[in-house]
Amino acid sequence: MLENLFPDMPLFDRKAGKSVTDRLNMGRLYIFNIFGAVGVLLLFAVLKLFGIHILPGKYQTLALLTTTFIFLLSAAAVLFTTRTRRTDLFDKVCFAYLFVFSAILYNFAFKATSDAAAIVFYWIVMIVIGCLPVLRPEMFLVVWAIDLIPAVILAWVRGFPAATNTSLVTIGIMGLGLSLALYSNTIRKLDYKLRLDSALSEAETDPMTLLLNRRGLDRRTENIWPYCIRQKAHVAIMMIDIDNFKKYNDTYGHAAGDECIRKVTAAIRRNVKRRTDYAARVGGEEFLVMLTGIEPKLAVKWALDLKKAIDSLKIPHADTNFNPYVSVSMGVACAEVTEGVTFEKIREEADKSLYEAKYNGRACIYYHHRAFGKPGSSLKKTVGQ
């Protein structure tokens, strides 16, 4: 029946239950239940040992509602102040709160009136039905048993009246419907966001190399450049060109040429490791890499490491008179980013260095009119002088 009400929702979907999100939810849920049960037992032991009563008196329900209100305000504050990292922190706050809150509520069930016991049962039911849509059947049964068995025992010990049981069933049905409706709406929003992100990624990614295309390069630069200006970050831009690639293409064909490009760009991707760095395909066999927070000497060393990685691929070249294997020429430009320094200005300097590398024999790196990666060149002697 529920599947008919929400046909687009993967309720009890075994495949959906294996997703990363569901595994994380399950892990958190199991941890919460296990530690919650242990915590309750420890709390009861401490209470019995010292004879402590949590929030005794006729104001227990008011104190309970006040605690809930304070938690909601705290949760709102956490969400507002941690927009960029709210997921992990908010989850930790929620589960820590639920652990303490459940322990207090279990104590209420034994110490307070039947009204407090009804609140206990209500919260247990709401926790379970709130988690229902993300669980596979066998997982749901385990969690349901963990949460429901103590509630049944409490109901038997407290002797809930018929009116209370009826109201709890009504609350459970309403909560289940609300939970499913909210979950279905969330799934629709996530699906829309995933489709949008996928379309945006496809529009900004070169399909053959999986590097950024020109559009993606422009958007990424627009996003990161203001940060670089504020931090006065040192930025390095490398222009990379596969040597004599036209002859390679003409000799081996376009399919082999595409495979050569894929191998070279795979080496580039492996070397671009930080989230603030990125690589783009800006021409047929020409690529751009931008590194942030890096000094010139380290930038040249990075370029040398990349050149060595590409040389180690030992892709046979058609132009054996030049080089038996495919090689690259690189131009490097570095600058401290301030208000007057633009991405295009640094890129132009890198282009000029690339031209110098190609003009002076290729298969080398040029930075500030000096060659690297050639016999006799020295990184220590030339960079920074």
Image (cartoon, helix red, strand yellow):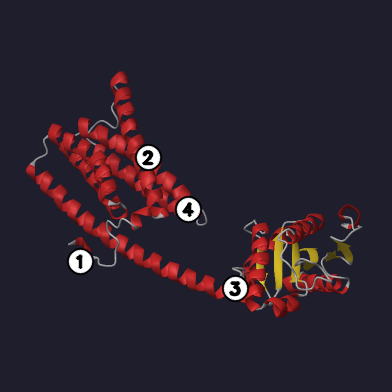
| Image location of residue 206, percent across then percent down | 59, 73
Number of the front mark, 1 or 4: 1
The residue under label 2 is which amino acid type?
A: Ile
Q: Of label 3 and label 4, which has the lower sequence position?
A: 4
Q: CA distance from mark 3 to mark 1?
A: 42 Å
Residue 40 location, quadrant: top left
**382 and 170: which one is in front?**
382
Q: Of label 4 and label 2, which has the lower sequence position?
A: 2
The residue under label 1 is which amino acid type?
A: Asn
Q: Of label 1 and label 2, which has the lower sequence position?
A: 1
Residue underneath mark 4? 86
Q: Of label 3 and label 1, which has the lower sequence position?
A: 1
Q: Secondary structure at mark 2?
A: helix
Which quadrant of the figure contains the N terminus?
Answer: bottom left
Residue underneath mark 3? 206
Which quadrant of the figure contains the C terminus?
Answer: bottom right
Q: Secondary structure at mark 4?
A: helix
The residue under label 4 is which amino acid type?
A: Arg
Q: CA distance from mark 1 to mark 4?
A: 34 Å
Residue underneath mark 2? 31
The residue under label 3 is which amino acid type?
A: Asp
| Image location of residue 322, percent across then percent down | 83, 71
Q: Is residue 161 left or right of residue 294?
A: left
Q: CA distance from mark 3 to mark 2?
A: 42 Å
